[in-house]
Image (cartoon, rainbow, N blue to C red):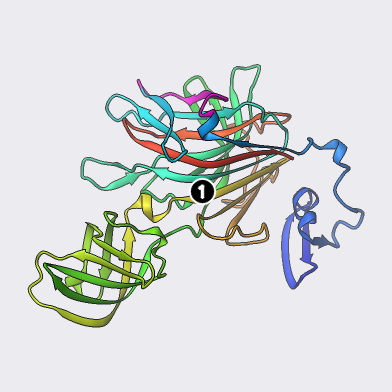
Amino acid sequence: MLVTMTHEDLPGVERVVTRDAYRWVWWTEGWRSDDDPDWSGPPPAAVRSPLQSLRHNWVRDGWGPWSEVVVSASGSATSAYTVTPLGRGRITGQANGTDGNRRTWMLRRGTTWVDSEVCSLWWGGSIWQSGAGTPNATPQMGHVHRAQLGADGRWRGVVITNNIFLSTADTVNQNVWETEAEALFLGAQGGSKVFPVGRTLGVLGVSRFQFVDWFNNYQVTPSHLWGLQVGDLVTIDVGDATFDTTSTAVSGVNANQGTVNLVEDSATEAVDFKIETGTMAPEPHKRFWPYWVRSELRGDILRVKVWRYGETEPDWGSSTNVKIVDFTVEDAEPGQGGRPEPDATMPTGPGACGLVGAHLRSSAWMEYGSTTFTGL
């Protein structure tokens, strides 16, 4: 059953969701529906899992309290689990050749709940390149909710992952996963949404000067540069093609003034500052990562929130930063959820929470920062 909601603080704004989504999720956010007149609030807390929160300490505990589940194998590929000097949990691919379709869940001890929330900082990782040298696949990071091993020997879970193709790590997927032998089924395609985590800079103007070497200077926005550093590779496209470049290392940054410098070996004369608009795009691992992901599974309703590292976390009412999936909808529109059958079975009852480590070719890696699990 669908209901139409209005918000007590947002006159004229409406949302249409399933009744279960309204009752279990939206009611607590201040939304009300005249289509559900008998509803007077969420059920008593006694019928829900007790609120518990576990913040994992990478430096103190490392990967000790985690268990690896191989969701699907890939040739001889394995994974190594370490903690970096910066205190991040790193997963590194160990494989012969390019066996890179291995998918694993790392399940955290003490997180077996029916309903749960997982929040972690995805630092991203290395980008795999084809023989042509074009970056075309990222490692696949993610969250796992309600992971269960059934009596039939299959693992099932609700999983949130970044897209791996064409290095578009700003696209986040929501699915029900199920295993059979070494195969993996994606049951309900909860949809893929592009979240606003891109860090492509806008070029406002350019100039060229000589200080021993010749340098191209770019005035960019935002001025804080999204953390761009000396040595990062960028591709620049502006009106004046003499200032264009592909996968070139940055030689100087000034986050106070919003300027970026690159050595220009072919230059022979200075260029005064002029307005030239365009883009400065870092390589994929710097263009999107790091970003925060908070996912919440209540019943069959999955909410996912994504936002840039260093920015204020948006609230659950954000239509830009939040994706909501209802896995009970019979005939959902593409990207809006739907029943997992016939490819997978929606897990019910308690299951473990964890992180995903997938699509890591030999020596490729990914890193997780602050990670918290909460039972709801």
Q: Is residue 288 above or below residue 95?
A: below
Q: Which of the 4 quarters of the picture holds residue 226?
A: bottom left
| Element assignment for label 1 | strand
Work out whether residue 217 or residue 95 is closer to the camera in this orientation and state it: 217
- Which residue lies under the disc numbered 1? 172
Residue 258 rendering spot, x and y as whole percentages = 36, 71
Work out whether residue 140 or residue 274 is closer to the camera in this orientation and state it: 274
Q: Is residue 82 above or below residue 241?
A: above
Work out whether residue 130 or residue 262 is closer to the camera in this orientation and state it: 262
Residue located 53% across and 24% down the image? 64
Whether residue 163 is visible here, answered yes or no, is no
Residue 317 relative to residue 22: left or right: left
Whether residue 280 is visible here, answered yes or no, is yes
In the rendered image, which quarter contains the C terminus? top right
Residue located 52% across and 34% down the image? 58
Residue 92 relative to residue 272: left or right: right
Residue located 62% across and 60% down the image? 314
Residue 40 rendering spot, x and y as whole percentages = 91, 53
Residue 51 relative to residue 165: left or right: right
Q: Is residue 302 above or below residue 268?
A: above
Residue 245 rendering spot, x and y as whole percentages = 21, 63
The reply to whether the magenta stretch includes residue 127 is no
Residue located 92% across and 54% down the image? 38
Residue 75 rendering spot, x and y as whole percentages = 36, 22
Looking at the rendered structure, the kind of residue marked 1 is Val
The reply to whether the magenta stretch includes residue 62 is yes
Sort mark 1 into few (<14), some (14-19) or many (20+) by Cα contacts within 10 Å.
Answer: many
Q: Which residues are magenta?
A: 61-76
